[in-house]
Amino acid sequence: MSRRKFLRQAGALTSGLILHQQLMAAFSSSLQQTINIGFIGCGDRSRGILSIMQELPAEFKVTAVCDILDFRLADMLKAVNDPNVKGYKDHRKMLEDKSLQAVIIATPLNMHYPIAADALAAGKHVFLEKTMTYNIPEASKLVQLAKQHPSQVLQVGHQYRYVPLYFRVKEMIEKGYLGKITHIDCRWDRNWNWRRTVPEGYTDKQINWRMYKAYSGGLVAELLSHQIDFINWAFNTHPDEVLGTGGIDFYKDGRETFDNVQVVLRYNKENMIGNFGATCGNSREGYIFKLKGTKGTVALLVNEGVFYPEPATRKELQVVDGVSGATKIEWNKDGGIPILKEKGKDGTWYALKDFHACVTEKKKPTSNVITGATTAVCVHLANAAAYTNTIQQWKPSYNFSS
Amino acid sequence: MRPFFILLLACFYLAAARPREMQPWQLSGFAQGTSWHITYYAPDSVASHASIDSILDKLDSSLSIYKPYSLVSQFNRCTDSLQIDEHLANVVNASFLASQNTGGIFDITIQPVTQAWGFGPIKVTDMPDSLTISNLMHCVDVRYLSLKGSVLFKQKPCVSIDVNGIAQGYSVDVLADFFEWKHIENYMIELGGEIRLKGLKYPGAQPMRIGIEAPAESEFEPAMMQKVIRPANGAITTSGSYRKYFQSKGQKISHIIDGRTGYPAKNELISVTVFASRAIMADAYDNALMAMGLEKAMQFLKQHPDMAAYFIYRKKDGAIADTASTFFDKFIFVE
């Protein structure tokens, strides 16, 4: 099934299982071709991607792994568990390997651009973790670079574009089931310091790079970028104005990135406000993603979602004493309708399937350099607003096109 | 002073002797994978939520294909016969009659085929091919079942049953019997869109109104009403292809499987709403009428004047239309 045809038909999807099949059909390649792939950066994210990739042996063969930290490299080689896989400390050396067709880049944010540029120059297909780049100039440069390598795939790891639940929500928005959406509320909270233990012989900056502005965009880049990207995708839009605030409000432990942040994105074309916030000082609500429309609310967890119709849409039910219809939907006891009856696979699974299909069939990924650049700009505007207490405006130069 | 006192006493006496006013009592909950709502009219509450739950639990443990311990599941696993309870026996007997009357379109032994099409308790990932269906159809025939006393027999070990098409209707009847036993004369019982109603609503002694749902493309769209009816005492059930179907290769696969062929019904009907005296009857025939298609369904109703039906269908030009049998027309309510 072609992707376009799939998207046309998606309106009739009814269950998670079928959604899984259709997503699989849309993101799968008809070509039986195994891609030789290498990992650059072997932290937790790469280990997660590796475990999912190991479910896809027909699509990918891991042939090389690279990390500048010895213990990460050793752990990754152990996890790959294949004596033929080569370990590298320098990604440029790894990229010289002609048999290597593609790379996963999952490094600290400041290294995304230089490594992606090296990989493109070396003729590799690139799966680049989010956020795409550390700053806006790098986002622009990567868009230009990708244009110079039209036969190579550059996919960005904004995986909500591949999660069945989020796919379904996008469709609900497009079909108008939520009515006019005016407000979006997102949180990604925790009640811990968001730090990793530093093994002996390593520095805090090497392990806890997310705490340092030189390497990371903090909570906004590492977490909220997912939801920001989803809104860009679902509404085919970008914010026009970004307000922000934040601070190092609880963990005064030498970190530079905020442990408490709130940004407000104004979408003029959509007449919509998006609130995106995260704190390291409370875990009561944890993950929140709510889209509020005149006809109903969608409340999302990472892999579950519930639709709550607005009371007005139920009013009609009150003029009769009973309603006869085909067997009814299962309403939650709080009046919500579950969005998926069954959980699909992890978004990364579909994202990797799409990466394989794009490489083998020379297609453009759903999460590509243009969408990745757009979301990277949003993240940087949000951080700029929060760090400098200014209102950031979208500029025409941020409107990327392929 | 004295006349006033006597008057006061008389008032008290009259108040005590006059029957207390009817008022609505409402109960609702979740069972059988859907919701239920009950409204009954009585001076006092006569039924608790717990008593309804316990009736529905008992029915589930007899009839549910989704409960591995149910009698239906036990029967499907057994190779020969099973001692069954009164509920399952009632449902099986009603099923025999419905199979006979519909020429096998309604058939509870269709279970292996329904499962293969993905509408059973086990998840499937691929649509069945014609060979699979023709092999499975060797296990499908209601004549492979026989009920002797309270023992249900199967002629072939592969025979298994699915009473989902009739269980909700039967459950509604059992609940109605419960209220009858409590001497309640005015009630509306609804489970998963299947309804039994009797009498009037109070205060005001007005006839009850029942909405027939319009087909919606998605469960997230607000449920709109296609028609509002004022039926006689009896049961109203609806079968529709609009809510439960799969999409495969651009085609909608309806959950309504024709027991004669083993294939999903493909015709112009989107939903059928049936009126009958009991919900088990209405429920048994709504799916069969769906499978027949509009013309044959109308003919069928002429031969069965104890039933009435309302149809929503798609015309050849794609437009959605509705029609009803003559008997049903009388219920259609015009403000």
Image (spheres, rainbow, N blue to C red):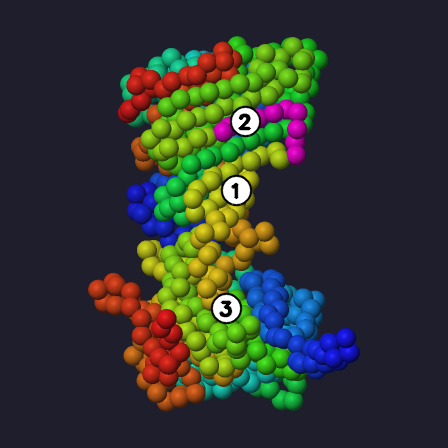
Q: Quadrant of the N terminus of chain B?
A: bottom right
Q: CA distance from mark 2 to mark 3?
A: 44 Å
The residue under label 3 is which amino acid type?
Answer: Asp
Q: Which mark is residue A321?
A: 3
Circles 3 and 1 on the same subunit: yes
Residue at x-position 31% and y-position 22%? A400
Mark 2 vs mark 3: in front: 3
Q: Chain of mark 1?
A: A
The image quarter containing residue B181 is: bottom right
Q: Look at label 1 and name its amino acid.
A: Ala
Image mark 2: chain: A
Residue under the point 43% across and 44% down = A294
Residues at badges 1 and 2 in contact (C-beta under 8 Å)?
Answer: no
State the residue in front, A363 or B91: B91
Q: Give left or right: position of A207 versus A12.
A: right
Point 60% across, 86% down: residue: B147
Residue bearing the label numbered 2: A277
- Which mark, residue A299? 1
Residue at the extreme front of the image, as rendered: B1
Q: Which mark is residue B309?
A: none
Where in the figure is residue B32, as x and y percent of width and height?
A: 58, 65
- The residue stretch that appears in magenta: A275-284
